[in-house]
């Protein structure tokens, strides 16, 4: 954070973007409990962010800096993985079906498989299954997964309406 403050004080930083999951508490609660306290700690400003995708201008080091935030959500709650699950192109990949069966099997055990872990693994399994269909050898597949090569338009609908607010957020930086 100190490097960022120096950059702002020199006038090098004009905009700060905050991307965070809304999670269970939802957008308003996340702004109040996480985003605004972080801004207050860093810049001494209270309640700087009122709503996502709105510009909040602050003066720091004699320079005006705009702060914007976007909270990944579906209908006010959730996270990036929820959006990715919705915008995936192939809704019938084998690996994700296997994951559902695996989680169902675990219900009888005392160790619970958390929803967060499920969501992360769902996206990873989806990516693996998509890449696996390309006919790459094992080493190429591992490398493509390691480099997040499954985040490409052939696997995800980046024009999906669910991404409209995220695109609006990104437009704020033009």
Image (cartoon, helix red, strand yellow):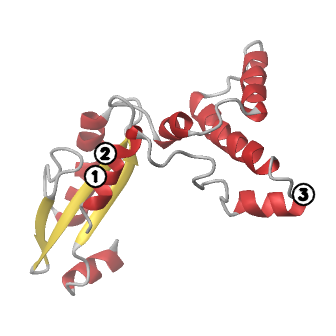
3 and 1 marks in contact (CB < 8 Å): no
Where's the N terminus, which quadrant? bottom left
The label number, if any, that marks residue 165 in the structure image: 2
The picture quadrant where one finds residue 12 is bottom left
At numbered mark 2, what does the secondary structure look like: helix, strand or loop? helix
Q: Residue furthest right?
A: 137
The picture quadrant where one finds residue 137 is bottom right
Q: Which residue is label 3 attached to? A: 138
In percent of width and height, residue 119 lies at: 59, 35
Q: Which residue is label 1 attached to? A: 168
At numbered mark 1, what does the secondary structure look like: helix, strand or loop? helix
> How many numbered discs sit on the rendered protein?
3
Q: Nearer the viewer, residue 16 or 133?
A: 133
In percent of width and height, residue 13 lies at: 25, 78
The residue lying at 19 percent from left, 44 percent from top is 51
Q: Judge whether 35 appears above or below 58 on screen.
A: above
- Label 3 or label 1, whichever comes before in sequence order: 3
Q: Residues within 10 Å of mark 1 (few under 14, many from 20)?
A: few
- Label 3 or label 2, whichever comes before in sequence order: 3
Q: Judge whether 167 appears above or below 42 on screen.
A: above
The residue lying at 62 percent from left, 51 percent from top is 154
How far apart are the alpha carbons under marks 1 and 2? 5 Å
């Amino acid at each position: 954070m100190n490097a960022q403050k120096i950059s702002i004080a020199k006038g090098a930083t004009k905009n700060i973007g905050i991307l965070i999951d809304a999670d269970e508490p939802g957008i308003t609660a996340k702004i109040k409990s996480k985003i605004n306290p972080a801004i207050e700690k860093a810049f001494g400003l209270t309640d700087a962010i009122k709503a996502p995708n709105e510009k909040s201008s602050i003066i720091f080091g004699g320079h005006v800096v705009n702060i914007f935030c976007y909270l990944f959500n579906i209908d006010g709650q959730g996270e990036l993985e929820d959006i990715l699950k919705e915008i995936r192109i192939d809704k019938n990949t084998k690996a994700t079906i296997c994951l559902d069966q695996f989680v169902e099997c675990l219900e009888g055990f005392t160790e619970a498989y958390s929803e967060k872990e499920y969501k992360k693994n769902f996206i990873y399994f989806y990516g693996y299954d998509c890449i696996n269909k390309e006919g790459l050898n094992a080493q190429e597949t591992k490398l493509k997964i390691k480099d997040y090569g499954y985040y490409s338009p052939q696997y995800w609908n980046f024009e999906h309406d669910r991404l409209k607010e995220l695109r609006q957020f990104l437009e704020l930086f033009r």
